[in-house]
Amino acid sequence: MPFELDSNTPLEGMDLFTVYPKEYVVNSLNYLSRLGRDFGIEFNNLNGEFNTRRAHLAEYYAKEHNKYDEYSKIVFKAYFGDKLNIADKNILNEIAKSIGLDVDDMNNSIDSNKYDKRLIEDYNLASKYHFSSVPTFIINDNIRISGIKEYNEFKKTFLEAIQ
């Protein structure tokens, strides 16, 4: 489900170094890069934060058209690997087009507020489960695992939670 870390992020984006200490941001992204390397995931966006609302709304459209997996992987790479501002409608249009989605229909669906209620419901659910970071996993409707973890640490925590 979608989750915005900061819904007040302006559409043009902002510099994370103005929100968090530079050392914290750099250390966090170095950690992510180390974990992602084994999976071919690059984290090149060292300090840009972009508004993700429209990208989340487009995600619903992609789900309706059985393109969610393709869409989410490309958006992730665009944001973290390519440092692209995914609040930019043109960037989302190019992503949608690249996976065979009807760009005009997607934008009409988003602009008609078709997915707004669903987004609010998902945000409310995230609030119910006290999401504060991504990723967050909810297990058996009451156990929460939050944040980036080494694979073995995550696996251990997950297996303990389901027993």
Image (spheres, helix red, strand yellow):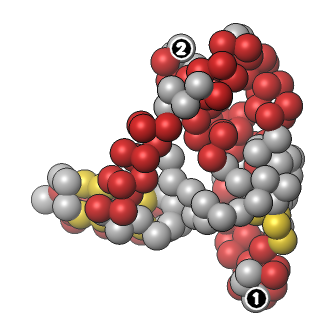
User: Is 152 placed left or right of 21 in the picture?
Assistant: left
Q: Residue at image x 83%, y 25%?
A: 94
Circle on res. 21:
1
Residue where numbered disc 2 is placed: 65
- Look at the picture and state if 117 lies above or below 108: below
Q: Position of residue 57 (x, y in %)?
A: 58, 35
Relative to 107, residue 28 above or below: below
Give the tally of numbered discs.
2
Q: Residues within 10 Å of mark 1 (few under 14, many from 20)?
A: few
Front residue of 98/64: it is 64
- Asked whether the viewer can see residue 112, the reply is yes
Q: Is residue 94 left or right of residue 120?
A: right
Amino acid of disc 2: His
Element carrying mark 1: loop
Task: Please state, as top left, top right, bottom left or bottom right, where the C terminus lies in the image.
Answer: bottom left
Q: Estimate the spatial distance between the alpha carbons at disc 2 and disc 1, rounded to whole Å.
A: 41 Å
Side of 22 where 58 appears, left or right: left
Disc nearer the start of the sequence (2/1):
1
Q: Name the residue nearer the viewer: 151 or 32.
A: 32
Q: Percent position (x, y) of residue 30?
A: 75, 72
**Residue at (79, 25) in percent of width and height:** 93
The answer to whether 101 is drawn above or below residue 53 in the figure is above
Q: Position of residue 142 (x, y in %)?
A: 19, 61
